[in-house]
Image: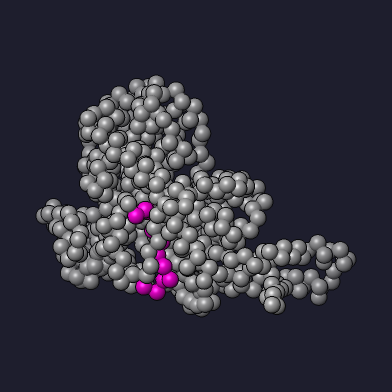
Amino acid sequence: MIKQPCKIFFHTRYVSLFMGNLSSSNEAQTSIPMAPAPDTCKKPHAVLVPFPAQGHLNPFLKLAKLLHHRGFHITFVNTEFNHNRLLKSKGSTFLENLPDFCFETFPDGLPPSDADATQSVPALCDSMRRNSLVPFRELLAKLNNSWVVPPVTCVVSDGVMTFTLQAAHEMNVRCVLFWTFAACGFLSFKLCADLIDRGITPFKGIVVICIMWMEGLEMNVRCVLFWTFAACGFLSFKLCADLIDRGITPFKDSSYLTDGSLEALVDWVPGLENFRYKHILTFIQTTDPNNVLLAYVKEEIEAISKASAVILHTFDALERRLLDILSPNLPPIYTIGPLQPLVDQISVKNAVSSMDFSLWKAEDECFEWLNSKEQNSVIYVNFGSVEVLTPCEIQELALGLAESKKNFLWILRPDLIKGNSGILPPDFSAETKDRGLIVRWCQQEKVLNHPSVGGFLTHCGWNSIIEGITAGVPFLCLPQTTDQPANCRSVCIEWGIGLEISKNFKKDEVGMLVKELLDGENGREMKKRAMEWKKQVAAATASPQGSSFQNLETLVKEMLLK
C-alpha cells in the first residue's frame, strides 16, 4: 500500500527568504522550521475552541489533555486577549516544550481594555458573533495547508461558539459541540424560546451570555459542540428557546418581578417536574422586544441540529432523567464528566499533562493556612471568574461570615465588586484575622479536596458545582446569572447537597446557613449525600467500565476519528 505523504506547504514568508536578497545560505536554513517527525503526519488533529472565559477554558484544557493522551495532535484556540492574559499569569515559557500541542489565536473584535479585568460578556458575545467567522475560517485553512502539523480531523467547539460549524462544514471536517452546562442548564436555554413564543418575555432583567458556533459548517469539517455544562444547565438553555417560541418572553412589563410570574411551572415538557421560569436561563428576564440575546439564543438552539454531536460535562447517574428528556431530536449526546478524574488517570506525566490554565495568578499560601485548620471546619467562598457583586452584597457576606464565628477562605477577585467601590466593613479584618483568609485567586480543585474544607459558598457555576461534587463537598448556593439558577435547583432539590441563600440576603441569614452547613443536622446529612455522590463520580470515571470513561472512548472512535 502506498502511504499518503504529508502535505508540504511553504508559507509566503519562507518563499520570500529564498527569492529575496539573503546575506548567506545559512540564513535561509535557520529561518525555515524543521520538518515534522513522520509520525506527526499520521496523527489525528483536533482543533479545540473554548469560549474565552476561565470557566470554559478549564474543561476544554482537560478534554485536550485526554485527546492528546489518546494520540491526537491538539490545536488549542484562544482569543488574543486571553492568550496574552495566560502568558502574563503563567510566564513567557508556559507554551514551550509541548509536543504535538499547539496554540493559535484570533481576535475577539473588541477595543483594547484592562489586561487584568474580565471582559464584558454581552459585548464579547456580540462582537465574536459578528467578527469571528472570517479569522477562524482563515485559521482552519492555514492549519490544513501547513506542513508542520497534520491535516485537521475534527473541531471541538464550545456549545456557545457556533461560528465554528460553518467553517468546519466548508472543510468537510466534523464539528462536535461541548456545552459546559449541566443538562438542566441546557434545558433552560431551550425553554427561553418557549417563553418568547408565549409572549411572556422580554421583561426587564439581566442580560447574560449566549455564544455562537454556526459558521464552522462552511468548510465541511466535522464539528462537535462541547457544552461544558451539566444536563440541567443545557436544559436551561433549551427551555429559554421554548419560552421565546411560545411568546412568553419578552415579558410585557416589569410586574413580572413581583407578581409571581417567575414561579410559574414549565408544564409542556413531559417528565419535567417542579421546574419554574425562575430556573430558566436569566436571558428571559427582560421586557425589551429587541433584546438581541433573546433572538440569539433561539438561533443557537436551532443550530445545534447541525452539529455532529453534543458533549456535556456531566455523568449519567447524576442527571439520567434530564438526559432522557434532552436526547430526542438532538444529535448524539456524550456525557464525559467529571473530566478531572479522567485526566488523573493519564499515566504519562509530561508538560502537557501537567499544564493548567489560569487567567489570574494563584496564591498558594492559602494551603499552609488550610493545613492549620481542623477537618471540615472551613467554608470556602468563591464566585467564579465572571460574576460581580454589589458593594452592599459584599458587606452583608462579610458581616455574615464574621457573625458565623467559623473559619473561612474567601476568594476576592480584583474585579469582583461592581464599580470597584466596595470595601469590607470596618474592623472586619481584625475581628476575623485568626479564622479568616482572603486571597485574590487559588487552585480551586486542590482547595476543595483539602480535608479542612467542609462547605462551599458558590455562585453555582457548573465548573464549581461539578468540582465540589467530585470532592464530596456540600454547598451554600447564591446563584447569579445564566444557568446558575437551574444548577442551584439541582443541588438543593434534586441531589440534596446544598442550601440556597435568598436573593436579597442579609448578614443574619448568611451566618445562620454557614453554621448549619458546617455544624447542623442538615449539614451533616448533606455531607453524607455529598460523599455518596463522590463515590458515584469514581464509578463513572473508572477505567474501563465507568460510563463517562466509556462515553469518551466511544466519542473518540465514532465521532472524532471517523
Q: Position of residue 235 (x, y in %)?
A: 29, 60
The answer to whether 429 is drawn above or below residue 456 in the figure is above
- Quarter-wise, where is residue 264 in the image? bottom left
- Say whether residue 488 is left or right of residue 30: left
Q: Position of residue 329 (x, y in %)?
A: 30, 71
Do we see residue 225 in this rendering?
A: no
The magenta span reads 304-316
Q: Is residue 311 magenta?
A: yes
Which of the image's four quarters has the N terminus? bottom right
Count of marks placed on residues: 0
Q: Nearer the viewer, residue 70 or 88?
A: 70
- Say whether residue 390 is left or right of residue 131: left
Q: Position of residue 546 (x, y in %)?
A: 42, 52
The answer to whether 148 is drawn above or below residue 112 in the figure is below
- Say whether residue 556 is left or right of residue 204: right
Q: Nearer the viewer, residue 373 or 403?
A: 373
The answer to whether 87 is drawn above or below residue 15 in the figure is above
